[in-house]
Image: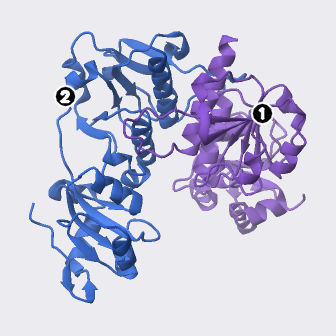
Chain colours: A purple, B blue
Amino acid sequence: MSTFVPGHQVPGFFMLTNNQVKFIRSLQLKKFRDIHHQFVAEGTKLVLDLLQEQHPVRAVYALQEWISEHPVNPGTELVEAAEKELQRITSLTTAPPVIAVFDISSVIPDPASAENELVLLLDDIRDPGNLGTIIRIADWFGIRQIVCSESTVDLYNPKVVQSTMGSIARVKVHYTDVCVYLEKLSKPVKVYGTTLDGENLYNLHLSASGIIVIGSESTGISGQVKKYLTKKLFIPSFGASNHAESLNASVATAVVCAEFRRQTMLQ
Amino acid sequence: MSTFVPGHQVPGFFMLTNNQVKFIRSLQLKKFRDIHHQFVAEGTKLVLDLLQEQHPVRAVYALQEWISEHPVNPGTELVEAAEKELQRITSLTTAPPVIAVFDISSVIPDPASAENELVLLLDDIRDPGNLGTIIRIADWFGIRQIVCSESTVDLYNPKVVQSTMGSIARVKVHYTDVCVYLEKLSKPVKVYGTTLDGENLYNLHLSASGIIVIGSESTGISGQVKKYLTKKLFIPSFGASNHAESLNASVATAVVCAEFRRQTMLQ
């Protein structure tokens, strides 16, 4: 895409043009991210993690001090910005010392990969914080691929990007028609999902590969996805009263992933 | 306290006075919650859970339809309110059909209880959503007591109350000087905490009673609390790159509590 306007740099005098400011701010909306195939990442850890993973970068806007402390690849478009300029383009309350624009890379998920590794499948996760936390959990537990239903919140929503704490750089997230994806899986691939009528997670032998389906915050796994489950799981509640009806979607993801990995560790 | 002004009810005509609206809204601030020892809960599930657990209630403000569908104890001060009145007192974007004011009950934590059951100790959790989620996790895993450092975010902060999804009604949360509390523990009580130099959680025998310390989101367990730990735990990261430096505080709580309960289940 050629819509990106590089920084106007006169030595010793730096200023983002109004068009640049407008463009970067527009990327807070999915509509413009879809048109330009670009997204914004803010803060030192997130930007450095993405750069380190060779994520294609359009431009890095940073305070002079940040630039002098953080050498980046010579080819990178690096624009020195004043604090008040960063304040104009940030999606956060307080601007961080660095904000960067990256390309959105679209990759088609390969159903064959679930034959050899664990893959998370998110069926309609709507909360940006939950998606960000789930990506962080996947990263921690060494899960490298997440397949999302098309109704799942957008990965490049600024709140999702920020709440991944850098894990967005290492975990591949795809959006697709999950039923088509599940249909294409080869027969022996196990499809796990947590449901209220599932079996106690801790009484089952869990495999080191396959799909773990995470349902939506409000309605769980949808009927159309449920029929692909080969094994239903339930996280036992130890509460005396059993009044706590559910765990948060990201918390449930963490408990399930931890148990898969604990069992793999023992194998 | 006698500061609460009951609803002015003329049959067929209901209106919250400006003083009532002002009072209920003031409870969004800790300063006024501390003065009046009252807090606000919003939404059907939360209000019903608190009423069911006999939490002392000052008044319930609800739409007429809600009142006709949800019988409450005869002694309860029940005020019919119009939607736009609820909109004036809600802390949420959209007013739920019911909003209630409850008493804050202060209980002193008993260090002896950790001899017989698991108790969570929160060392400076600052994010309201994290505290709410941790209370929900405790409820799920049958942990009935949480002891918080005085620097931990206030339990009755509207965001905490709402994010507990009703679990606030069942889990006792105390604020205290945690070092004084830990100092008073009897010798055999185990004090667990997650630290970066801890032992693999899954290689340890975990007890069915004791304290589990959860550190702050940014700095982990503080130096002054760390010296009371009798066993340091670490949630193993299965990530190939090990770039994900940490799990979210509430996610880590869930993984640790789940493993304590899994081991207890086997005993």
Label 2 sits on a secondary structure element that is: loop
Q: Are marks 1 and 2 in contact (CB under 8 Å)?
A: no
Q: Position of residue B3 (x, y in %)?
A: 12, 66
Does residue A31 sit above or below A66 in this rendering? Answer: below
Judging depth in this view, the residue of A109 and B46 nearest the camera is B46
Give the amino acid type for the residue marked by disc 1 in the picture. Glu
Does residue B175 sit above or below A12 in this rendering? Answer: above
Label 1 sits on a secondary structure element that is: loop
Does residue A107 sit above or below B52 in this rendering? Answer: above
Q: Which residue is mark 2?
A: B110
Q: CA distance from mark 1 to mark 2?
A: 50 Å
Q: Residue at x 64, y 24 (%)?
A: A204
Density class for disc 1 (Cα within 10 Å; few <14, some 14-19, many ≥20) is few
Note whether residue B36 is visible.
yes
Judging depth in this view, the residue of A29 and B211 nearest the camera is B211
Side (left or right) of B17 relative to B166: left
Q: Are marks 1 and 2 on the same chain?
A: no
Q: Which residue is mark 1?
A: A53
- Quarter occupied by residue A85: bottom right
Density class for disc 2 (Cα within 10 Å; few <14, some 14-19, many ≥20) is few
Judging depth in this view, the residue of A63 and B26 nearest the camera is B26
Note whether residue A48 is visible.
no
